[in-house]
Each structure stands twice: as C-alpha cells, then as structure tokens.
Amino acid sequence: MARILLAEDEEILRMLVLDTLEDEGYEIDEATDGQEAYERLSMNDYDLVILDYMMPRMTGLEVVEKTRNDLNKKNMKMMILSAKNQQADRERMKEAGADFFMSKPFSPQQLLETIGEILGA
C-alpha cells in the first residue's frame, strides 16, 4: 500500500485524516509543522505528501518549493490542503510545484477519492 506523509498542524484535523487513511490501509507518517515535514522528506521517499498550506515554522508552499528545489524530488506527488482557494493562491501553489490542491473543508470520502485518483488506485 502507498506510503503517505501528512503534515497538518491542527491536531483534530490531522487525527481525522490519519484515521481515514489508515482505515483504508495506507501507511502514514505525520508531521505537525512544515519544518518537521521537510526533515522527514529529506530522509524518506513517499508516494504522496499531503501538506496544510498554513503551518508554523514553514508553510506547505515553502515545503513544496524546498523539496522540489533543494531535495530534487521532482516526481514525488504533493497535495496542498487549504482554505485559501482563490485562483491566485492556486496558481502560486502550482508554480511552487504542488501537483494537487484540495479546498478545506472537505469530506473524508472526497479526500479518499482524490487520493485514489492521484495514486491510480
């Protein structure tokens, strides 16, 4: 089953997503902020990285940029979760190297369907 890194600073949302994905059999590593996510990315490869846009120490956008540029992980699939869903925000995420975007709030079913599409499940 796919290995996913989940980086979300809101504990309740992180636990909800974690439980949803683990129930489907995904192997999940978690990070509570952007810096921790980047450190995990520097040591591991993942099939998918799910990042909250607004996190302490490093935003999801900064994690995507640094991962793409400094770690040279150009092919790793990266998705940003955000309440910021204006077209300009989406364009910034795409320019940074994010492959996918999901607007908050979202349902667990919507998340699973999107991840299934991303991973070709």
Image (cartoon, grey):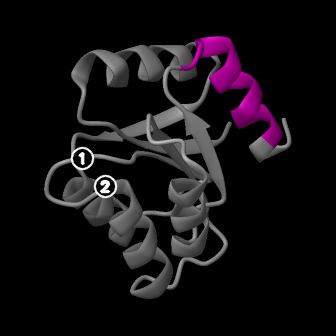
Q: Calculate the distance from the C-alpha at mark 2 to the C-alpha at mark 1.
A: 10 Å
Secondary structure under badge 1? loop
Instruction: Measuring from the top left, give residue 4's x and y in whole percent.
Output: 53, 43
In the rendered view, would you say 23 is above or below 29? above
Residue 116 painted magenta: yes
What label does residue 84 carry, if any? Answer: none
Residue bearing the label numbered 1 = 55
Q: Amino acid at mark 2?
A: Ala
Rate crowding at label 1 as few (under 14), some (14 to 19) or many (20 or more) other CA atoms within 10 Å.
some
Question: Image quadrant for the C terminus?
Answer: top right
Secondary structure under badge 2? helix
* Residue in view at x 50 percent, y 56 percent: 89
Name the side, left or right, on which 114 lies relative to 46: right
Earlier along the polypeptide chain: callout 2 or callout 1? 2
Which secondary structure class fits the magenta region best?
Answer: helix
Name the side, left or right, on which 56 lies relative to 94: left
Name the side, left or right, on which 48 lies relative to 35: right
